[in-house]
Image (cartoon, rainbow, N blue to C red):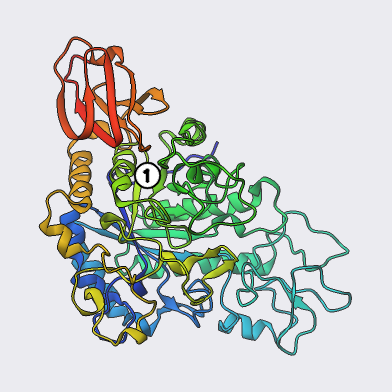
Amino acid sequence: MTSFRPAPAWLADAVFYQIYPQSFADSDGDGIGDFNGITRHLDHLAWLGVNTVWLNPCFASPFRDAGYDISDYFSVAPRYGTEDDLAALVEEARRHGIRVLLDLVAGHTSDQHPWFTASADDPADDRYIWTDGTRPAPAGFVASPGARPGAYLPNFFDSQPALNFGYARPHPAEPWRRPVDAEGPRANRAALRAVMDHWLGLGLSGFRVDMAASLVKDDPDTVETSRIWTETRHWLDATHPEAVLLSEWGDPAVSVPAGFHGDFFLQFGGPTVGRPLRSLWNNREGTDADEWDPVDCFFDPSGKGSPRPFLEAWQEASAVVAGRGFAALPTANHDFARLNCGPRTPQQLPAAFAFQLTWPTLPAIYYGDEIGMRFVPGLPDKEGSVLGPRYNRAGSRTPMQWDSGPGAGFSTAPADRFYLPLDPDPERPTVAAQRRDEGSLLHLVRRLIALRHATPELGSAGTVAVLHDGHPFVHLRGGRYLVVVNPRRETAAVAAPDAVRGGPLRPLEVSGVRVGEDVVTADGFGYGVFDLGPHA
């Protein structure tokens, strides 16, 4: 088993906040969010209590896939500002006690990247995966746009050619299946380190790696891809020991042993193709893919769902990653529907946060979820947002709703120049309104984050014992803190666990939950966190 330097101590206490930069805050009135807009709102993040920000890609790009098609890894996209603006954001965030991570696209570039345009005219260049043109290209390859014969392999959209990290199983009949130690794959591994080194030198604290499992092709069980990340982690440990790597893999039991400090439960990935996360949040009313197996989500008013698919996956992952890294649980992300989606109402959201912010994973809050921004259906395709007939990611990417003024405080530009339209609902939530309302979701999220920071037993390292895995869901953290969550609309009750019998009970954050000597009762959408005291 590979031995790595222990994860930086700060990671165990991280509460992540994901920012889609073009939709967060526009400082220059062009309708697109930017670095300076983020800097101006760091007070909000510090007040909320988040301490680690992850930015979606901000590198130079033609934006055919919202920046996940990079044309220059060493330059920021002008729409966001300059490198000096990014450096100022990182420094100001540091003063607020917030670390900043960038999104690193490791497996492909834009077809406008100079590496690719050169490769398209040079048959000797194996920076990308090319057929030789002597026989028909396999399915999935795209015809060469340059003087070079043959076709290239894309990694996602056709405009995103896959960087060549080699094939796990070369074959003489397909000479483009270069081994992982060929010149092109070696050059790409070195380039990956050079990109990371450059941005870490600016004061960044690490990276979230896009499509991290996609590097080596025809790689059963991602063995060779894992070796690349192991090599990268050893380099990172030696050169930037306080930096972290988080993966978009969706399978912590594989990615963390490979070298990542953490991995997200995602709507895809792993042996059940993202079922654990979907079984919590996905009501199939927002982003939804045909290949996803139907599963009733636990946070649904019907009460049909169960926490067991998530619990089983978390337990299996925890057995592997404990002491080596972390699993992270997001509320949503730029590819997956927000919590407030379809028929789900704002009244249902507090229980979801009570679960997420007390469970022993690293919590990741998607921008705007802290005020209950909704998934907006029916938007036009924007920068490759549409992936299927029921999968338009734009609904999760609408502008942040700061206040009730013109442009919702996001931008002073005319509305028709906004990156995406604002949520048209006249009752849309705003940060300003919820700051004024102590009973708002925003204040609850803030209190739960503060409680997590103040109570190590509620953090990523505290123990957890599930006392009831139905309605209500009941678990005990650190042998002392009782958490009760009821995501259905009907009242739910369960026999009081032995831990609560015969002793004092101090409510820490409670709505609609009553703990008696014999019964724990939770009203519809109720939640509660209680301190049972040191006797428990």
Horizontal arrangement in the rendering, residue 372 relative to residue 112 (left or right) = left
Outermost residue toward the bottom in this view: 147
- Of residue 341 and residue 360, the one placed in the foreground of this image is 341
- Of residue 258 and residue 239, the one placed in the foreground of this image is 258
- Of residue 238 and residue 133, the one placed in the foreground of this image is 133
Disc 1 marks a residue whose amino acid type is: Ala
Q: Does residue 426 appear in this view? A: yes
Determine the image quadrant of residue 141.
bottom right
What is the x, y in percent for residue 443? 17, 50
What is the x, y in percent for residue 225? 61, 53
Horizontal arrangement in the rendering, residue 154 relative to residue 460 (left or right) = right
In the image, what residue occupies the spot 53% across and 49% down? 230
Q: Does residue 43 appear in this view? A: no
Q: Is residue 43 above or below residue 309?
A: below
What is the x, y in percent for residue 337? 45, 57
- Of residue 526 and residue 51, the one placed in the foreground of this image is 526
In the image, what residue occupies the spot 51% across and 76% down? 381
Q: How many marks?
A: 1
Q: Is residue 248 above or below residue 320?
A: below
Q: Is residue 526 above or below residue 269?
A: above
Quarter placement of the C terminus: top left
Q: Is residue 12 above or below residue 175?
A: above
Horizontal arrangement in the rendering, residue 81 relative to residue 285 (left or right) = left
Mark 1: few, some, or many residues within 10 Å (few <14, many ≥20)?
many
- Residue linked to disc 1: 7
